[in-house]
Image (cartoon, grey):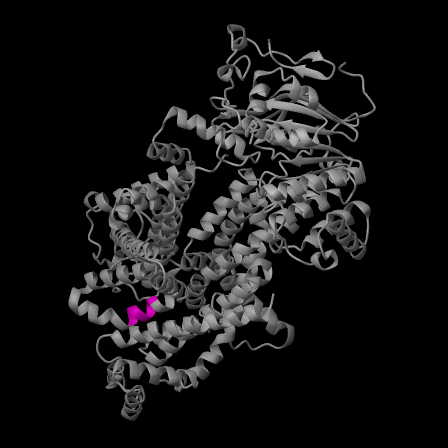
Amino acid sequence: MPDTFVPDTLLDIRGLKTWFKTEDGMVRAVDGVDLHIDRGETVGVVGESGCGKTVTARSVLKLIDMPPGRFEAGQILWQGRDLIPLEQAEMNRIRAREIAIIFQEPMTSLNPVYTVGDQIAEVIALHQKLSPRQAMAGAAEMLRLVNIPNPQKRVHDYPHQFSGGMRQRVMIAMALSCQPKLLIADEPTTALDVTIQAQILELMQEMKEKFGMAIMLITHAMGVVAETCQRVTVMYAGKVVEEAPVEALFSDPRHPYTQGLIRSIPRIDRAVSRQARLESIQGTVPSLLNPPAGCRFAARCKYAMDICTQGIPPLKEVAPGHRVACVL
Amino acid sequence: MNRQYIIRRLLIAIPSLLGISVILFGILAMAPGDPFEELATNPAIPPEVRMALRAKFGLDDPVWQRYLHWFAAMMQGDWGFSFQSRIDVDKLILQRLPVTLIVVGASQILAISVAIPVGVLAAVRPYSIFDQIASTFAMIGFSLPTFFTGLVLILVFSIQLDWLPFVYRADINATGWAFYAEHIKQSIMPVVVLGLAQAGTLVRFMRSSVLDVIRLDYVTTARSKGIGERKVIVRHVVRNALIPVVTLIALQLPAVFGGAIVTEQIFRVPGIGSLLIAAILANDTPVVMGVTFVFACLVVLFNLIADILYGWLDPRISFR
Amino acid sequence: MAGSTPASLSAEAPVQAPAVAAAQARKARSISPALETWRRFRRHVLAVTGAVVLLILVLAVLVGPYLWPVAINDIDFAAKLQGPSLAHPLGTDDLGQDLLARMMYGGRISLAVGFAAMLVALTVGVLVGSVAGMSSGWVDAFLMWLTDLFLALPTLPVLLLVMYLFRDSMKKVMGVEGGAFILIVVVIGALRWMPVARLVRAQFLSLREKEFVEAARALGASKVRQVVQHILPNALGPVIVVGTIDVAAAIIFESTLSFLGLGFPSDVPTWGSMLRDAKDYLDIAAHWALFPGAAIFLTVLAINFIGDGLRDAFDPRRVL
């Protein structure tokens, strides 16, 4: 169904290839990714570090430095309109207003020389055409929404006066200040303490209920996915290897890599038993510089056969909404 | 930005000044022989003056006592007497200081207003043609000794083209606009020589600072907000990149004043730099010491200003 | 939690991801760090050009006098202030002395001063930096205060002051040229060690905590052994870069001193003193000033480009 547009689809990434030119050659960070997000749903994107999740996320907002990066192929359809050919000015009307993003490192994502109020008000003033005063009031209101105590006063504080978890709240407040239809959360909890992680996820859930936006949640934590997402896309070495509703993925993972990911989740109920050894996937992600021909997971796959190294298996639908790129 | 921070910087500046005065006095005290002995051979100096000097500097006291005496005298504005100009050293320096400050100040303004935009543009498009040209010219400016630039400018603009005077004159017999026009005309070459040398260094600083800042996360955040690229660069990159550059400019100050001495000497600008050279050539020790100390004070003063500017540019500092 | 395999140590910013992959790829090809540095340096066109130019200059001043055996003080009033000709390829000065011979002689002095002063600065800097980096508490604090103090000294005025006070007595002890040489080298070195000291100390502080030094410490390596075997080799890259720039800075300082008449005695031809003599004849014998000026500029530019190339070569983070 290449050209039929489903009205409920917000974002539809088709065959996206984002490559980086380096001194040693072309790094194929994202190499043919298909991914779609419907209105109001939470989609998890999981995979190891360096598998291309972050580059995919940043590609959507065209936040990739070009050069060295470039879009080699594919489309990023936002409500049916391809973002790749858009001019910067048009892209800027979509950023923050329709698609917002929060990053992994709350400690470095805010500009240290401006108050958090200034930084939130900057977005509000820009997209809602408000006066600086009204924008600042809006900023304080956003801080209140993300449960920062004493927001009227704290808008005048600098980022270094906030803790990591508080800064991530500020980032969320900033991202949601223009009520975007999609929030991309790029490992929003990875850099935080475990207790704070839960609070931030809870806050995102709460905000989702309030604003009704869709969320693209990038993470490598399968536990987080299980708790928050409706659908999951599993990425490996720049490619999508499996895509499924969350229950299906956990109950019936088809790709050996997905199976490995799920088995490597520590579980209390299994820990008491004898075979409590936490499993890990042997080996490392292949170089994206000269990716192996064939299935990129083949070298680490315990089911690998000759055919696996010969051609790249396409995504096949194995059940409604459940697609997998494996010959098995 | 709070008052405490400024006071703390002030308190740090005082030991620096004391340290520098110790170093300068130490150099003077270590100098072989009696620096005032040479004055004996100078017929322009009456022996009483020399004896008075000897007594005032207490040349037979222990070193630390001599230092304290010297320092106390300097603090009271008693900087000695210039044999060459037959005038108190502090008055002489005060006469000459404004010219130096104007030339140095104008050249710094020129350097900053050229270098910051060029450095930013070069860094925004790294390895582009513009960047390569700018970086090469910056390197040339950085490598050109001021005395050579000065001579080449004189050769081209004074001798070949006859556009600008190559000797700076304090006594211009003109009034009104013509007076200012002449002054500006004769200041152009010294200011440009000094400014270009500084601009080369500054372009390199600014370029590398912007390159460091532009890949930080908060710049991506700014872009993700939908702010135009120009505004992202000015508000979120340049503003932050200036913070380390302020420190680097302060570190460059000794070199700037060194350049000022050479420039004043070439164009015969009547500032404290040419005064220093003249005093050295005339063995006028009190003036040499006085001017050197003034240069040291200027460096410390501008370092202090840079520190305060730094605290103003970076809110994290003044809260610490 | 999940993910589980030790795939990559770095956080994944989009630019870093390819950098990591590239680093892995390089590691796979197993090129030694020194070779890798050389590979990067070789690709820096301007740096290689600089190295070639410097090599030619060094050869010219070393071998040149044998190929062009004209005395530097052969006075010939009949041929004074002549432009370049076959008899005098670079022309003559106001005494009819051959400029090519004098330039080669001056070049030896400039380059020798540059390298010697760099060695002094590096020695002092590495020493102070290592001591400060190894010790903590008040020793470190005092040494860093001293470093900052020296950074705030107005270099040229202090240099002039020292030359003024010590020149004559050094001449008596070490002879005319030797005295000036040693004095200039020591003083320039003494005023240029601070960046090296800071750099070495900073390397110490960051490397001290790294695993391999910790491993060495756990194995009972002595402090000196830790420094010599583990820390200094790692600090080498940046120190070499600063040392390169120091050569250029020392050459400029020496030329400036000579230009102001406070460097080598006036009968010794150095590039700076030739410029000083030539500046009064700019209108009739511009070549006299242009050749030595261009020589200083070219040497300094070549060295600075080499320094730039080395800086890029030693900095493996750059992605292009």
**Residue C51, picture quadrant:** top left
Image check: B141 left or right of C277?
right
Q: How many marks?
A: 0
Magenta-highlighted residues: C159-164
Residue C29, percent from left and from top: 39, 24
Instruction: Determine if residue B233 is in view.
Output: no
On-image quarter of the N terminus of chain C: top right
Image check: A79 left or right of A51?
right
Does residue C273 lie above or below A314 as drawn?
below
Residue B176, percent from left and from top: 64, 76
Image check: A38 left or right of B70?
right
Residue at the extreme top of the image, as rendered: A306
Q: Main secondary structure of the magenta part?
A: helix
Residue B12, percent from left and from top: 46, 70
Residue B48, percent from left and from top: 29, 93
User: Which residue shows up at 51% across the image and 41% down it?
Assistant: B132
Does residue C97 lie above or below A292 as drawn?
below
Q: Nearer the viewer, residue A64 or B315?
A: B315
Residue at the extreme bottom of the image, as rendered: B48
Instruction: Determine if residue B68 is in view.
Output: yes
Does residue C61 lie above or below B87 as drawn?
above
User: Which residue shows up at 59% across the image and 23% down it?
Assistant: A262
| Residue A107 within the magenta-colored segment of the rendering | no
Does residue B6 lie above or below A326 as drawn?
below
User: Which residue shows up at 67% across the image and 55% down it?
Assistant: A115
